[in-house]
Amino acid sequence: MSEHLAPRFNSREAAVIAAARFIKDGDVIVVGQGLPVLVALFAKKTHAKRCVIMHEYGVVDMNPPRAVELAHPLLAETATYLCDMLDALTSLLYRVDRAFLGAAQVDRYGNLNTTTIGDYFRPKVRISGSGGANDIGSIAPSSVIIMDGQDKSKFPEAVDYNTTPGFFRGSRRDRERFGLPGRGPEAVVTDLGIYRFAPKTGEMYLSALQPGAVAENAMARTGWKLKVAKGIRAVKPPTQEETRLLRALDPRRVYLR
Amino acid sequence: MPIEEAVSRFVKDGSTVAFASSAGRMSIAYAYETIKQKKRNLKFASAGTGAPCLDLLVGARAVARAEASFTMVSCYNIRRAMECNSGPREKGYRFEFEDYSNLAMTLRFAAASMGIPFIPIRSLRGSDIERVRSFKGKEKLAVMKSPFKDGSRVVVLPPCRPDVAVMHGQFADENGNVLAYGPAGSDGWALKAASKRVVTVEKIVTDKFVKENSIRTFLPGFMVDAVCEVPYGAHPYGLFGFYDLDEPFQKEYARMSKTQEGFDAWAREWIFQLGGRDDYLKKVGHARLREISTGKLLALV
């Protein structure tokens, strides 16, 4: 392929770069497994060099030279603070600016499923369970969801299993009712667009379109009647330099595949 | 203590075994030995990344129930035991799973270590982890109103008290003082919660070395029931300051464990037909082990 020449980004790369723009320099962020790791690292290597990246198993301020799996010792070996999960998922979690989470399904009201597809007791697919996702989504002040692709099965009306609640069945106030400390999801990023949540109901709507994407396609790949923002924005396409940097960060294609 | 003895003495059929398992402290060697000794009907408990240990134990039909928070899509043995259409299940083998979150399992271990009857948590409320119950039923968790002015309703969790907990650490001395480096995950809580604690380590060191590095002492000797020197005990997973993941090995394991026959063949080759740890390391290959070694911490001793 021509990746060593002037690179043209693909749609997954565009999603990662768009999600990374939610991270401001100096932010403290907590990342779940999968694409969130790459999103955070990309921000740290580009526009947010002073951001602090934390993972729940007790790694704070990781800065590996390249993207590796979360179990890789290189993450801890480049960190400035190591602690345990109790510390990371309680006292530290309250102080982060934002969480980045992936999911197999995100529904109309931002609820996330990372547990099972189909019936819980006889699932079609066992995914991974909560890990720390429920704790992060419940407690972190705010979260951004990055999805690996978008279709009706990944964007259903209601998740098969609500691992990590967003706005339940359409009420932001339900988070308060259940005593969840965090405000819930602020955005969902896919290869088609950036989605946000309505003020009262917490219903997801299309806020911006990725380069080359059209609203009709995003609606067709959503499992409910998707609302579209008036004056929908276009996401700024990744530059060649950004694309080159992102690929250099993941040379073995751990995340970009 | 030889690892064979650390399994045979502490793990009985039906025991609850916690694999303390933050990234890079998995005692994969202990899981191998548990399988080799054909333990059955075990209960598995873990917060976080103990999934590779669980996958091995489920593949070997050693574990009946798991209280945990995490599996992985590459854990094919677990998936085969749970999913409705990922190939035939083993006759007469039943595996049940109770889902918690990482923080929930960590707090359950902490509650057991503190000797308290339950512990509150701010997450889980409203989720299907709260609503849907597997084998624990009403004993999974409850919702309770704070008796204090605050009055808020929170989930409370029962303690998790394993019969045995095992971790792989970097160093220990002859008295069982364990030195551990790297992120701690839930390891300390799982060990402190358990009736018997086993720590496999890369290297036995002198008590002088422990005293000079006591800031790294993870558990004092009186809290540890057995220490086993097991170099590369976390292989094919990594260990902070010692070695990286062995990715080709992990990929081959995942490929083989897509079917029960495949896993059985893999287990024969890598567990049952080997005389002991030396055979395992020889079979992985010393050249390969050198390749993944980072050796940063070994330079200390």
Image (cartoon, coloured by chain):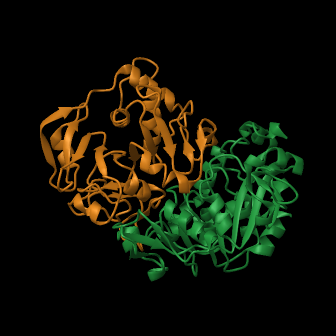
Chain colours: A orange, B green
Query: As drawn, is B235 to the left or to the right of B227?
Result: left
In the orientation shown, which residue stands out farthest toward the top?
Answer: A5
Q: Position of residue A249 (x, y in %)?
A: 50, 30
Q: Which residue is drawn at 39% across and 49% down?
A: A102
- Rendered image quadrant of residue A26: top left
Query: As drawn, is A193 to the left or to the right of A64?
Result: left
Q: Residue at x 53, y 73 (%)?
A: B89
Q: In which quarter of the image is the N terminus of chain A?
A: top left
Is residue B274 in view? no
Query: As drawn, is B122 to the left or to the right of A56?
Result: left
Q: Position of residue B196 (x, y in %)?
A: 74, 71
Q: In this view, does B142 lie above or below B225?
A: below
The answer to which of B118 and B170 lies nearer the viewer is B118
- Rendered image quadrant of residue B191: bottom right
Q: Position of residue A129 (x, y in %)?
A: 46, 61
The answer to which of B111 and B68 lies nearer the viewer is B111
Q: Is residue A126 above or below residue B231?
A: below
Q: Where is residue A160 in the image (x, y as percent from the top left)?
A: 32, 65
In the orientation shown, which residue stands out farthest toward the front?
Answer: B149
Is residue A23 in view? yes
Q: Residue at x 17, y 54 (%)?
A: A200
